[in-house]
Image (cartoon, coloured by chain):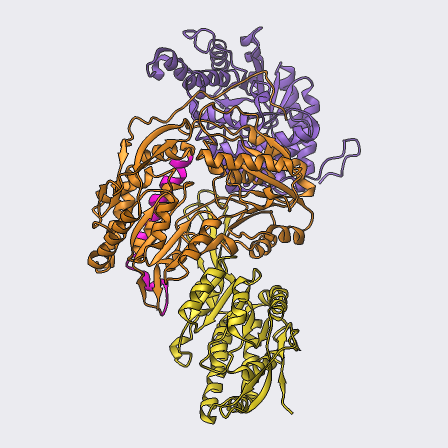
Chain colours: A purple, B yellow, C orange
Amino acid sequence: MPAPSTTKPARPDFRFSPRVDQVGIEERAKRIQTRSIKNESKAQGLKMVLSMMDLTTLEGQDTPGKVRQLCHKALHVHDELPGLPTVAAVCVYPSMVAVARAALGESEINVASVATAFPSGQSALEIKLADTKMAVDAGADEIDMVISRGKMLSGEYDYVFDEIAAIKEVCGKARLKVILETGELDTYDTVRRASDIAMHAGADFIKTSTGKIQPAATLPVTLVMLQAIRDFHRATGRMVGMKPAGGISTSKLALHYLMLVKETLGEDWLDKHGFRFGASSLANDVLMQLMKQQTGFYQSADYFSIS
Amino acid sequence: MLKTYKLYIGGAFVRTESGRYLKLKNAKGDVIANVCHASRKDLRNAVTAAGKALPGWSGKSAFNRSQILYRMAEMLEQRGPLLVDEMVLMGLTKTAARREVNLCIDRTVYFAGWCDKYSQIFSSVNPVASPHFNFTVPEPMGVIAVVAGKDTPLLGLLSNLLPVLAGGNTAVVLAPEAYPLSSVFLSEIVNDSDVPGGVVNLLTGLHQELLPHLAGHMGIHGLIVDDCSQETAASLREQCAENLKRLFLRDSDWTDPESQHPYLILDTQELKTTWHPIEVISGMGSGY
Amino acid sequence: MAISSKTTWDLAPAPESSDHVDIKKTYGLFINGKFVPSVSGKTFTSINPANEQALSSVAEAGSEDVDKAVKAARNAYNKHWRKMPAAERAKYIFRIARVIQERAREFAVIESMDGGKPIRESRDVDVPLAANHFFYYAGWADKLSYAFPNRNPSPLGVAGQIIPWNFPLLMAAWKIAPALATGNTVVLKPAETTPLTALKLAEVIQEAGLPEGVVNIITGAGATGAALVNHPDINKIAFTGSTDVGKLIQRAVSGSDKKITLELGGKAANIIFEDAAIDQAVEGIINGIYFNQGHVCCAGSRLFVQESVYDEVLEKVKYRIESLIVGDPLDKNTDIGAINSKEQLQRVKHYLELGTKEGALLHQSSCKLPKKGYWCKPSLFENVSPSHAIAREEIFGPVLAVQTFRTVQEVITKANNTPYGLSAGVWTDKGAKIFNLSSRMRAGVVWANTFNQFDPVSPFGGYKESGYGREGGLHGLSSYLNLK
């Protein structure tokens, strides 16, 4: 373990992060799913979901062509439905940042890049810093880093903290999202602790998953992180955003995520600065639901372009 | 000179605060002893003492309670001949007295043995449908008043008192009017058997006078009355409604071996059910 | 943590349809397998407390009707139920359970209309638990000898049962299921403000083909209940309701051999230690007091918070209160429905005024209440002292009395300082503390790191003035048996 840094501000002792009762948190999350979101609140919610979406492609087979397609989709989510918001960002690998940046032109859509030896994070800090710098230099507005889960699980909280803080410095103006990869953290207690570490180390967003590990985002794990965000805000006054990623493919589930945000953090968090969805197939389901609301007819995927 | 038999309250032998005494006569009409005629204030003091002794006695390990009750049985056996003499003095034949004392010893051994077993019989782990561990256990009810029946010098009293003690309750006992001496003898045995002061409090006096005060006392949680009339039963039920104290009216033949069973202990227990969540990891439920 | 106004996202109404439910304009008494008018012809009206509209006109049973019902039950006991092989008895009870499941939606909607509770609760809690209760006890009918080693359990005879208005169908199930399983026959009286689901249950009982008279359901108010309690041919009275009425019943039957069990009031302590999982504890506090509008005898109405986390807990509770949706019980999003009756609303209001007068600090949700019907905002009192009436008396509404503590011994003493003893809650992350606290709470049900959980296998009932006898589980059987 590295010696405690003397230049950094004093860190809380993360061993004492609040505990989470599994059964209780899951009951609460289940209760959110009994919320029935209909008619105008559904339409409003679905538009919010779109506006908070990070359209994502993170494949080994990604090419500039594929990334350009995705950016086109981001710019024209569904032209048949006028008045839709644009998505929040397009999320790609560092090598594709420049392509995406060019494709999105002057639009308000951000380019987000994963970094830090995504998805496993198993590399040296220097490599991770260079990875991040490369993405930032290529024009990334947002960096989605991964934490060192192995260090986290072996109790090296200071290491995890210092690593995030170092990446944050390299980010410059880019907003930092910290991926906890909750599916590898074993318990809600560890998720809570990792959330606290990430926020204290400077995260602008905390994010559940890479999308490469199952389980990815779930409602209860998101609730644990939202509660951490609320407590952090209560203690410091700083608003940290939340991004569940992976596994959210239906509109109904996405709306329940928003309801969870509303009831846990309040409506202040209900925009793209406070909440994001990391998803690839969710967009079309949202669009189909919106079309159905407008036309009254159930929709078919054949009529919605794939991203 | 006649002996004066005292009350036993809070681990001390005391005279009645009222200064009243009853003269106990034998079959020939000779006065054989002076017995305290307990007042409602004596009763109040006894209930206070029982309340104070409750946390200690109910908090003792079941094994320890078992040891103490067994010690009582040993003392009964050891002082058996003296007890027989007391009973003969009160009018029993020597044979009847010996038989009674032997039954008393056996009953004490019987309930001593139950102390650390009844909760295993009456507890349950309840398989609820949600992810919770849920179990039900008997707990001592609290301060129990025991009013002994009139048929036996000691056996009835013990048969009603022992389940109360085995279950971790403390007791205020009203001795049979006709047989106060053996009851006071019992309190000496209790006192010499490591039973902490206040766990058993023994009063001699007139039942009809004290019963309403027992039934009405807000600090008594349960009332056992052995062998009482229909009218008394009705008025007791009514009076017990005041604090919803649990009332048990009994009329067993205590010489019958079938009359002893652990359900007598269960009468003065409250059942507590506790819930606690159980973590479920990777979809694997718990084994409960 | 203020809610800003930059985005507002409110839920549109999502009412559960009530088209499919069949509420008759009038209901008779269910005696000897048939619906019959009362001898006097008297009726009373059951209204929907959420809009004060009449739902149905229900027969009011007088003493002659009670007598008819008891005779029917006695006859059914002697002729059929006592003689029937236990395994056959079980089949009838299983069938009742199944029919309730099949008609669950209808039961849930009627329960919410008649009593004011949110459809989410009647749908997810009351109705499934009621069906499960019949399932559980059905299976006991032919296994009773295994429940009581060395005893010969035998039924008592005719059971008179009186139930409250807070969980009308569920309480009917709690009463009827074990009584039938143990071989008794039943005369049940539901509460006068919520008779409808019990009468629907009577229809289910007809449908299940139970022999006539095994279950009789008579409707009416206190006088009907008194006639039932005083009927000479009743062997057992089972009552759930207020402690005052419980005491009256015990006095009323004091001259008889009737057995009684009483499930009465409560004033449960809900204790939050500083080492608890605070966010789940907050949820437990909310669920503990605002479930079913606080019309719950085991409600966690006395909150004790360790001083070191008091500010955090209270801030979070107040915030959570804001997210509770109060309104139309039939809306699927409603968290808090209507207060059950005008009378109960007055009682709750009385305590809200009294608490303020006593010097406690009232905090309520900022929600808006509907104009018609009986409503109360979720409320809590701070600066409560143990001697305040709001900390001692059962309010039976959505009103929480908050107190603080510093040490374990202090909170045990404070928690037990009440004539009641129905339930308690303890929140701490430390196992050893849980076992200490749960064993020292003088209460029949202790929820540790959870609250207001119910299950047919789990015995429920109180210490001290919360009554005696248990309902649910193996231990619930003995209330309806002679054990010789």
Residue B203 in the image, given as x and y percentages of width and height: 58, 75
- Report which quarter residue C85 is drawn in: bottom left
Residue B51 in the image, given as x and y percentages of width and height: 61, 64
Please check the rendered image and state whether residue C149 is part of the magenta-colored stretch, yes or no: yes
Single out the residue that lies furthest toward the right.
A6
Q: Nearer the viewer, residue A4 or C124?
A: C124
Q: Nearer the viewer, residue C464 or B239?
A: B239
- Which residue occupies 41% across, 60% down? C254
Q: Is residue A193 visible?
A: no
In the image, taking residue A71 as reference, residue C152 lies left or right, namely left
Q: Is residue C373 above or below residue C201?
A: above
Residue B95 in the image, given as x and y percentages of width and height: 45, 93
Q: Is residue B271 above or below residue B115?
A: above
In the image, taking residue A139 as reference, residue A78 lies left or right, namely left
Residue C185 in the image, given as x and y percentages of width and height: 28, 54
Quadrant of image for the C terminus of chain A:
top left
- Which residue occupies 32% across, 50% down? C177
Magenta region:
C121-150
What secondary structure do most residues of the magenta stretch adopt? helix
In the image, taking residue C468 as reference, residue A243 lies left or right, namely right
Please check the rendered image and state whether residue C14 is part of the magenta-colored stretch, yes or no: no
- Which residue occupies 20% across, 50% down? C211
- Which residue occupies 42% across, 36% down? C121
Q: How many numbered circles does the render carry?
A: 0
